[in-house]
Image (tube, grey):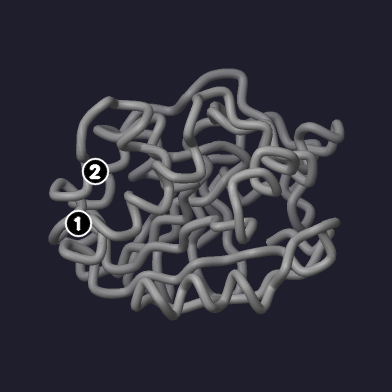
Amino acid sequence: MSPLSDRPKGGDAPIIAYSLHGSRYLNITNRCSLRCRFCPKFNRQWQVQGYDLRMVRDPDVREIVNDIGDPTLYHEVVFCGLGESTQRLYTLLSVASWVRTQGGRVRLNTDGLANLVYSQDITPQLEGQVDALSISLNAQDAATYDYHCRPSLPHSYHAMLDFIGRARRYVPEITLTAIDGLDGVNIVACERIAENLGVGFRRRVLDQVG
């Protein structure tokens, strides 16, 4: 299977789905309420592992499903592009539901700010649709988080922590991540936060994307 969306950078079609590490990754929007200093797109870099993830428009459910192909060919289908997938929550949920009905596993990489964006608790809607969450903790405190992530919405750090606590009721596997190498980020303290919340932790490395 050679989906059109698997073209490397320079192809004519926008890259919606791309394959890495045995998984199928989905790039469904470039929108985000954060402007992270370490995000490639804010450094004029749209390529991840040779895939150009800049989008002219957001794809619809049909286009996304077509570009996934057979989800059982992959370890998991991962919502993770150069944008925040929950900014398109209902598209995300529709695609996730389809993937699971086809026998696939779904992981969502997220900033954990969907409840803040939608002014309501959306975590119950993830139940039965998302198998795993990878949530960008990014820092051990609000001040460090605000410096590196530059949120557009107030109280984003605390909203993200609240999201984690709520999501535990509905998603069986949750992992927090933080980037080792960012000025002022204490990886040990970040891991301790994950332990206190009863979820997993993964250390990421600065400038290693994808």
Q: Earlier in the sequence, mark 2 or mark 1?
A: 2
Badge 2: how crowded within 10 Å, few (<14), some, or many (20+)? some
The residue to which callout 1 is attached is 129
In the picture shown, does residue 111 fall above or below 13? below
**In this orientation, which residue lies closer to the viewer: 47 or 36?**
36
Q: Position of residue 159 (x, y in %)?
A: 40, 42
Q: What residue lies at 60% left-to-right and 31% top-to-bottom?
A: 151
Pointers 2 and 1 in contact (C-beta within 8 Å): yes
Q: What residue lies at 70% left-to-right and 29% top-to-bottom?
A: 12
Q: Quadrant of residue 196?
A: bottom left
Q: Quadrant of residue 171?
A: bottom left
Q: Position of residue 60 (x, y in %)?
A: 36, 27
Number of labels in the image equals 2
**In this orientation, which residue lies closer to the viewer: 102 or 3?**
102
Kindly identify the amino acid type of the residue bearing the numbered disc 2.
Answer: Leu
Kindly identify the amino acid type of the residue bearing the numbered disc 1.
Answer: Gln
Q: What element does badge 1 sit on?
A: loop
Q: What residue lies at 52% left-to-right and 51% top-to-bottom?
A: 80
In the picture shown, does residue 166 fall above or below 89? below
Q: What element does badge 2 sit on?
A: helix
Judge from the rendering whether residue 55 lies leftward or rightward of residue 160; answer left or right.
right
Judge from the rendering whether residue 80 lies leftward or rightward of residue 43; answer left or right.
left
What mark, if any, has residue 154 been given in the picture?
none
The residue to which callout 2 is attached is 93
Q: CA distance from mark 2 to mark 1?
A: 7 Å
Q: Position of residue 161 (x, y in %)?
A: 41, 53
Position of the C terminus, as image quadrant, is: bottom right
**In this orientation, which residue lies closer to the viewer: 177 or 86?**
177
Q: Residue furthest top?
A: 57
Judge from the rendering whether residue 46 lies leftward or rightward of residue 13; answer left or right.
right
Q: What residue lies at 32% left-to-right and 74% top-to-bottom?
A: 173
**In this orientation, which residue lies closer to the viewer: 87 or 45?**
87
